[in-house]
Amino acid sequence: MSDDDINRCPWVGAQDIYIRYHDEEWGVPIKDDRTLFKKLMLEGFQAGLSWITILNKRERFVHCFDEFDPHKIAQYGQQKIEELMLDTGIVRNRAKIEAVVGNAKAYLELAQTQSLGSFFWDFVDGETIDNAVAQSCDIPAKTAVSEQLSKALKQKGFRFCGPVGVYALMQSAGLVNDHIVSCHRYEPCRKLAKKFEAPQK
């Protein structure tokens, strides 16, 4: 079977980087705190932009933000922020950059009592929500759960984590399986979800 014959979710573009993201990452359950933090930060940068824009800049984001290490980011001062504002390889939005610094501090504060992974997965009772959608138009931009999670994150001090961006993270990190059922990745992600053990506090 050629790559052209593989059925994918309709939102996947023709670019190789987008296809790889869909085929290898999107919908795979994740519990690693740092990976979830990175995804949350990138979703914050995506607000108002297309995801492909962020995807194309992702490697540079990771480099510029020290692999999204919250301990290092929490120490960023004004000089580092100004340096980031001059980097054309990332989204140069001051409010979003400053939010990442604040979010790193919020992450470290949360980590004193609970991991970010368990914080996220508690909202789905530790199990992937399998929506078994037939077509992309049936997939919502946000849900009641993503609104609750967004509100909880903001209460913990996180910024740029609205319910739409949070739902996109839930899809990406496998908290929900929103691959359409005819997509070649739906069943593999469903099987991964069944084997997945949610992180404990």
Image: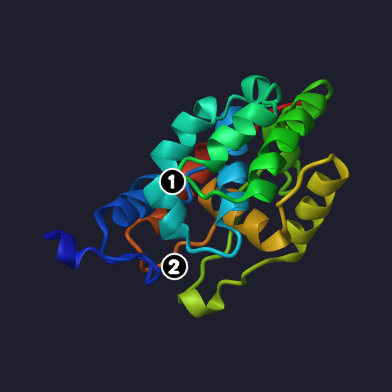
Q: Is residue 157 left or right of residue 116?
A: right
Whether residue 45 is visible, yes or no, is yes
* Residue at point 77%, 53% (across, down): 150
Residue 32: in sight, yes or no? Answer: no
Residue found at x 76% / y 29%: 105
Residue at image position (53%, 63%) is: 49
* 84 shown above or below 3: above
* 84 vs 168: above or below: above
> Residue 131 in the image: x percent, y percent?
57, 64
Task: Point out the tag, 1 or 2, that comes first from the N-terminus.
Answer: 1
Q: In which quarter of the image is the N terminus?
A: bottom left
The quarter of the picture where residue 52 lies is bottom left
Dot 2 falls on a residue whose secondary structure is: loop
> With 143 as the anchor, is 58 left or right in this view?
left
Residue 134 percent location from the top left of the image: 46, 75
* Amino acid at pointer 2: Ile
Q: Residue furthest left?
A: 2
Query: How far apart are the two marked residues, 1 and 2, measured between alpha carbons?
Result: 36 Å
Looking at the figure, which quarter contains the C terminus?
top right
Mark 1: few/some/many CA within 10 Å (<14, 14-19, 20+): few
Which mark, residue 11?
none
- Outermost residue toward the right in this view: 155
Residue 135, horizontal then vertical, whole percent: 46, 77
- The one nearer the camera, 66 or 79, is 79
Task: Return the residue at label 2.
Answer: 180
- Find residue 70 and report its image quarter: top right
CB of mark 1 within 8 Å of CB of mark 2? no
Foreground: disc 1 or disc 2: 1
What residue type is disc 1 on? Thr
* Callout 2 crowding tier (Cα within 10 Å): few <14, some 14–19, many ≥20: many
**Residue receiving disc 1:** 88
